[in-house]
Image (spheres, rainbow, N blue to C red):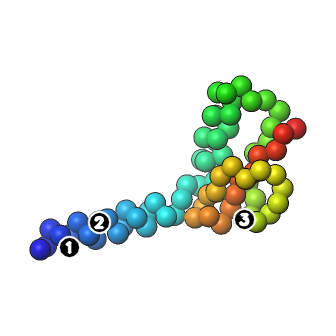
Amino acid sequence: MKKLLLASGLMMLATGALAAGKPCEELKAEIAAKLDAKGVQHYTLDVVDKGTPEGKVIGSCEGGTKEIVYRRD
């Protein structure tokens, strides 16, 4: 029974860490690397508050409070 409670507690902690999301700059760098690898040129990635319509949303970060927006230059 103690092992079951310990396992349940650890799973709850892990779930909380996943829900926090990635830091915006880390996710932005990963997305930029993928776009560069595909040969995409003349673009900008911006981190904006959620719901700010400035381009195509391609990711969210910091627990869903911010979005990463893609725009062609």
> Neighbour class for label 1 at 10 Å: few (<14), some, many (≥20)?
few
- According to the picture, the residue beneath numbered tag 2 turns out to be 10
State the separation of the CA atoms marked 1 and 3.
Answer: 37 Å
Q: Which one is earlier in the sequence, the residue at label 1 or at label 3? A: 1
Tell me the crowding category of disc 3: few under 14, some 14 to 19, or many 20 or more residues within 10 angstroms, Cα based.
some
Can see residue 46?
Answer: no
Residue at 67 percent across and 27 percent down: it is 38
Q: Amino acid at mark 1?
A: Leu
Depth check: 4 or 62 in front? 4
Residue 65 at x, y percent in the picture:
65, 66
At x 79%, y 42%, the residue is: 44
Secondary structure beneath disc 1? Answer: helix
Q: Are marks 1 and 3 in contact (CB under 8 Å)?
A: no
Position of residue 40 in the picture relative to residue 31 (left or right):
right
Kindly report the distance in space between the C-alpha atoms of the residues bearing marks 2 and 1.
9 Å
Q: Earlier in the sequence, mark 2 or mark 3?
A: 2
Give the residue displayed 68% in from the left and 62% down from the top.
Answer: 66
Residue that label 1 marks: 5
| Of 53 and 49, the residue lying toward us | 53
Q: Which residue is mark 3?
A: 50
Whether the residues at callouts 2 and 3 have beta carbons within 8 Å, the answer is no
Q: Secondary structure at mark 2?
A: helix
Tag 2–tag 1 contact (CB < 8 Å): no
